[in-house]
Image (tube, rainbow, N blue to C red):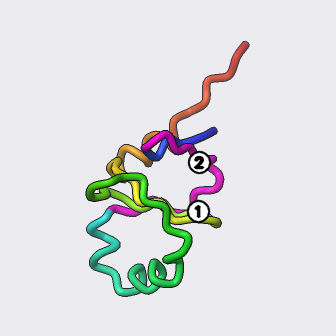
Amino acid sequence: MYVHLGEDTLVRAMEIIAILDKETVKSSQYMQELLEKKDKDIIPLTKGTFKSIVITENAVYYSPLASGTLKKRSTKPVLQEL
């Protein structure tokens, strides 16, 4: 299953390590250090401000969508065809 992160970007749900709220990241020194280390792997999906951060093995995405919305999209059950 794929999760739409914004700006026509899809990521496989199983590749997502974490979906974090922007405010949570701002208040954590550890997250700031992680983002500094991953600076070259950051992919901004918005021209304005972002609302959440999605961390995968290969990249860090700044998404314009809220973390709650992304969580719902990543856990939506897949309908099986009969």
Question: Is-magenta flag for residue 58?
Answer: no
* 67 relative to 23, above or below: above
Look at label 2 and name its amino acid.
Val
Relative depth, front residue between 23 and 45: 45
Where, quadrant-wise, is the N terminus in this rendering?
top right
Would you say the residues marked 1 and 2 are in contact, meaning their CB atoms lie under 8 Å apart? Answer: yes
The residue that disc 2 covers is 11
- Disc 2 is placed on an element classified as strand
Residue that sits furthest to the front in the current view: 47
Where, quadrant-wise, is the C terminus in this rendering?
top right
Identified at 39% across, 82% down, the residue is: 32
Identified at 56% across, 43% down, the residue is: 10
Q: Where residue 25 sits in the image (x, y, percent)? A: 34, 73
In which quarter of the view is residue 2 placed? Answer: top right
Question: Is-magenta flag for residue 15?
Answer: yes
The residue that disc 1 covers is 56
* 33 relative to 44, above or below: below
Question: From which residue to which does the magenta span run?
Answer: 7-21
Q: Earlier in the sequence, mark 1 or mark 2?
A: 2
- Disc 1 is placed on an element classified as strand
Q: Where residue 73 sits in the image (x, y, percent)? A: 47, 40
Relative depth, front residue between 77 and 33: 33
Count the labels in the image: 2
* 65 relative to 54, above or below: above
Q: Where residue 66 sits in the image (x, y, percent)? A: 32, 50
Main secondary structure along the magenta-highlighted residues: strand
Q: Residue 79 carries which label?
A: none
Look at label 1 and name its amino acid.
Thr
Residue that sits furthest to the top in the current view: 82
